[in-house]
Amino acid sequence: MNHSIHSADRATHLKIVVVALVAGIAVAAFGISARTNSDFTETAQTHVIKAGKPVAITSSETSAVR
């Protein structure tokens, strides 16, 4: 058994390329199908949040490092 990619033969390189190509296509197909199955137009709701008065939050428990 050959453990180096540098000394591998042409068939081994071809197998690696084919496996990588199939895995890439599978990931892309899964991503596309996951994106198209959910309908965002019906479930999206817009909520307007208005800013209130400014608030200052202080705590004496924190230590200041200078």
Image: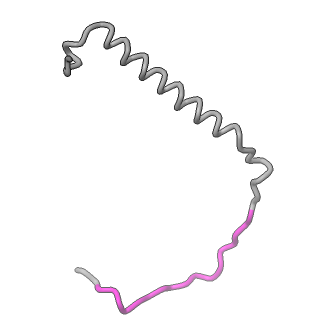
Q: Nearer the viewer, residue 39 or 66?
A: 39
Residue at 65% x, 39% y is 35
Say above or below: 37 vs 54. Answer: above
- The quarter of the image holding the N terminus is top left
Q: Nearer the viewer, residue 46 or 9?
A: 9
Residue reaching furthest to the right: 42
Q: Main secondary structure of the magenta part?
A: loop
Q: Is residue 23 left or right of residue 34?
A: left
**Residue 65 percent coordinates (x, y):** 24, 80
**What colour scheme governs how the chains and residues are painted in the rendered image of this protein?**
one colour
Residue at 58% x, 34% y is 30
Q: Is residue 39 left or right of residue 28?
A: right
Residue at 80% x, 50% y is 42
**Residue 10 percent coordinates (x, y):** 30, 7
Q: Quadrant of residue 31?
A: top right
Residue at 75% x, 60% y is 46
Q: Quadrant of residue 3?
A: top left
Q: Nearer the viewer, residue 41 or 55?
A: 41
Q: Is residue 58 left or right of residue 13?
A: right
- The quarter of the image holding the C terminus is bottom left
Residue reaching furthest to the bottom: 60
Q: Is residue 39 left or right of residue 7?
A: right
Label total for image: 0
**Residue 59 percent coordinates (x, y):** 41, 89
Say above or below: 24 vs 42. Answer: above
Q: Quadrant of residue 51?
A: bottom right
**Residue 64 percent coordinates (x, y):** 28, 84
Residue interval drawn in magenta: 47-63
Q: Is residue 60 magenta?
A: yes
